Image (spheres, coloured by chain):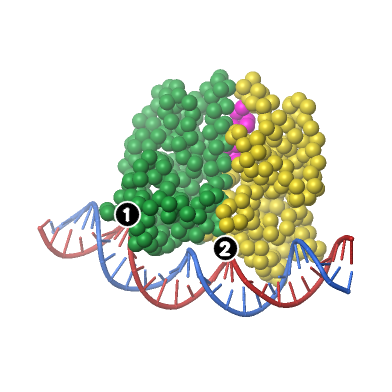
Chain colours: A yellow, B green, C blue, D red
Amino acid sequence: MLQATSDAQYRFHAQGVVHRFPSPERIKVRAGEPVFEEGESAEYFYKLVSGCVRLVKWVASGHRQICDFYLPGDLLGFSNADEHEFSAEAIEDGVLMRYRRRDADRLMKADPAFACELQTLTAQGLSSAYAHMVRLCHRSARDRLSWFLLDMARRSGSEWFTLPMSRVDVADYLGLAHETVSRVFTQLKKHGVIAEPKLNHVRIVNRGALEDGLLAA
Amino acid sequence: MLQATSDAQYRFHAQGVVHRFPSPERIKVRAGEPVFEEGESAEYFYKLVSGCVRLVKWVASGHRQICDFYLPGDLLGFSNADEHEFSAEAIEDGVLMRYRRRDADRLMKADPAFACELQTLTAQGLSSAYAHMVRLCHRSARDRLSWFLLDMARRSGSEWFTLPMSRVDVADYLGLAHETVSRVFTQLKKHGVIAEPKLNHVRIVNRGALEDGLLAA
DNA sequence: CGGTCAGTTGATGGAGTTCAAACATTGTGG
DNA sequence: CCACAATGTTTGAACTCCATCAACTGACCG
């Protein structure tokens, strides 16, 4: 079965879809290296096995927008355009499985059910993207970070989790300055909303406080 | 052929797709009335014949986010979820064709090529949504309005066009206060970038000035 | 021990929100 | 036809949140 594992991008799990493809390759990436880059031919798509990857768009004036983070199990780079419109960069060392786009095309034509599932998945990604759009508008820095922490907890399936990405990455994802992210972190810790005994090792202490003002997220 | 007519949402034209469906119904809506509402069963989808429709999400604290505007020819309400996740409201009196979702499902299963096209369309919508996300972050009020005006010109196919929506609608679309939108409008008129002889009748005078700083949109 | 890089904290300024009031436009009913 | 209300637009003034600039800390590494 196809399965969406996050509300921030289209993804699916290995079972049921990806394993049907012939001859996937196992790829290693080092932290900071690109998986694919904007403008590159979209010949391949990938499933993340381990590590963490960010989906990046550079904007004029040198600003960087991170459109999504991928965790193990997530699918990335599946595009219908000929070229990738975003870059994907490894945040930590990681491993990916690499599949050929045209194998998916063939399967879609041969197997309508598969095509339907892929369509469903992409449509879910679309409404998730809208959801993130809504979140970035008219929400305070604290609300944005609250949502982010709750989402990371949900994705990792625990109130304890490790953030693989830096404060700067979080900032570029939420549309904030990294100083602001840092400030909100300290504020949340001071108020006993979260704990961070070791850097980037986060525990949600007062979930209710994070959920305040997020009714419509 | 399926065809995307805007970069802000997935759409397609009548020729080639929608006309294949059996027995569409012709629906009239009055200004301000909903076409469908959040939470409603997504039994139908629609093609706008005349008028203008906004796609709306309400957020806590009473704020409203407009995710997209639809113009004649655009498709709306095509969702893979069982329920609509957004509301669609008529801005002006208008006419829509209404189609049954399950007819599309049947066609997708029967005709893989159609499924592929629909998938392509949705994937385009996804990257457009990401693009809008990027636009809403780290861009000044003036840049956002500039982009909006250029997009409206592109969609209407002319440097002269009528805005069917109010300043408030534009503000909720761009993530700004309506006063700010109003201020930027006057600023653009003062500087001779646009002309607005009658309210909401806009002419782009200095396209270059609008395009400045939009390199990465 | 210097050097680099990520994170924190402080001070300052500015773009945009918010509150408020005037103005314009449209529609309604007497 | 006018008076009046309702709605949308413009403009002003004060404030606020966040970006920016800058300095400092701590960790890691040669």
In magenta stretch: residue A119: yes
Q: Residue at x 32, y 42 (%)?
A: B93
- Mark 2 is surrounded, within 10 Å at the Cα level, by few (under 14), some (14 to 19) or many (20 or more) other residues, namely few
Relative image position of residue A169 (x, y in whole percent): 69, 56
Task: Classify A113 as above or below A124.
Answer: above
**Badge 2 amino acid:** Ser
Foreground of the two, B30 or A52: A52
| Residue type of the residue flagged with mark 1 | Ala
> In the rendered image, is residue B33 in sight?
no
Q: Is residue B181 left or right of residue A99?
A: left
Q: Where residue B3 appears, x then y in whole percent? A: 48, 31
Q: Which mark is residue B195?
A: 1
> x, y (%) of residue A85?
61, 42
Decide if residue B140 is in sight here.
yes
Percent x, y for residue A215?
A: 57, 55
Chain of the residue where label 2 is placed in the rendered structure = A
Quadrant housing the N terminus of chain A: top right
Of the numbered discs in the image, which one, if any, rests on residue A140? 2
Residue drawn 56% across the image and 41% down it: B126
User: Rounded to the nearest whole Å, what is the CA distance between mark 1 and mark 2?
Assistant: 35 Å
Disc nearest the viewer among 1 and 2? 1
Quadrant of residue C25 within the rendered picture: bottom left
Q: Up-down: is C6 above or below A65?
A: below
Residue under the point 58% across and 52% down: A59
Look at the image and give the residue range highlighted in magenta.
A115-125
Q: Mark 1 Cα within 10 Å, few/some/many (few <14, many 20+)? A: many
| Residue located at (72% from left, 37% from top) | A46
Q: Are marks 1 and 2 on the same chain?
A: no
Mark number, residue A132 = none
